[in-house]
Amino acid sequence: MVNSFERVKARRAGEMVDRPPNFNIYMAYGAHAIGEPLSRYYLDHRVLCDANAYLIEDRDVDIAQAISDPYREAADFGADVVFPEDGLPVCTTPLLASPSDLARLIPPDPATGRRMSDRLAAVSLMHERYDGEVPVMGWVEGALAEAADLRGVGNVLMDLYDNPEFLRDLLEVCAEVEIAFARAQVEAGADIVGLGDAVASQISPRMYRTWALPYEQRIFAAVHEMGALARLHICGDTSRILGDMATSGADIVDIDWIVPMGDAAAAFEAGGAAVCGNVDPVAVLMQGTPEDVFAETQRCMTLGGPRSFSAAGCEIPDGTPRANLDAQLRALREFGAS
């Protein structure tokens, strides 16, 4: 019987596997499944690792993932991030209220930043537990996403027009921090580094090619230089930029439920990337019937082709019925056997 590491390797190569890999992203669901509040999942790498251990054993997830919230880098830059006991973290005030604040911005060191080093500890512990058995995935923010975390999404979108020189300088700082963070995670044992750039779905294709894609390419080039794989995750409707995303250098590209799976698979195949997705996490996985989930999972894998990975379009919602997640796994097993 193949293990998850072997399954992922074979599927990327387009080879026959017992089932397509399950690359669902679990965060809140995983924390609550082991009886922990979200704040501990975000702030204590041991809790994050224990949640992943449960998901790997009980939910047949094929990846150990150090993804949590988007504020690790921002917090170590000095942003004021609040962690409710069992709620989502909130950045209360943008660290860069004015472009002039950039001169005072001190790039954090991943090894000493409190929250970045906690992710490194998670990757290291996962590597110790799963080396060669389950691939370990680290995580960084895209440069544009990190700029939005530091500046506020609305301010960054205005900066595209009003302060382009400032924004370019900020993106350079962000990109270098993310490159250093990615390298440190690979050194700690990450086999894959995921990159989240959600704000990139909110801008035009031309702007994506100018303000997001070049930095994704630089970060992924650094990941590849370290010998790891790269995974790109952009929430939302990315239909207009599929061809551009294919040039990012990502080995695996997530697509949200809004994006036609077949279109994405065709766009990514030329660049060698495997498409990952894209069951609707709410309308189907959380609110649908097991029969809905089974049919949609198999439909996505059929459209995705022989190198596709299975996942919801984004994070598995907390409270998703176990019967529906069982149906997703059953669909993958029967699909692999067909």
Image (cartoon, helix red, strand yellow):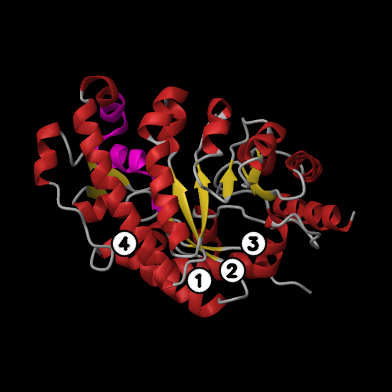
Magenta span of residues: 140-157
Q: Earlier in the sequence, mark 1 or mark 3?
A: 1
Q: Earlier in the sequence, mark 4 or mark 3?
A: 3
* Amino acid marked by disc 3: Val
- On the image, numbered disc 2 is attached to which residue? 54
Q: Is residue 213 above or below residue 44?
A: above
* Amino acid marked by disc 2: Tyr
- On the image, numbered disc 4 is attached to which residue? 116
Mark 4 Cα shell of 10 Å, populated few (<14), some (14-19), many (≥20): many
For discs 2 and 3, the disc positioned in front in the rendered view: 3
The CA distance from mark 1 to mark 2 is 6 Å
* Marks 2 and 3 in Cβ contact (< 8 Å): no
Magenta region, main secondary structure: helix
For discs 1 and 3, the disc positioned in front in the rendered view: 3
Task: Identify which residue is drawn at 25% across, 53% down.
Answer: 75
Secondary element at image label 2: helix
Task: Identify which residue is drawn at 72% across, 39% down.
Answer: 288
- On the image, numbered disc 3 is attached to which residue? 61
* Marks 2 and 4 in Cβ contact (< 8 Å): no
The CA distance from mark 4 to mark 1 is 18 Å
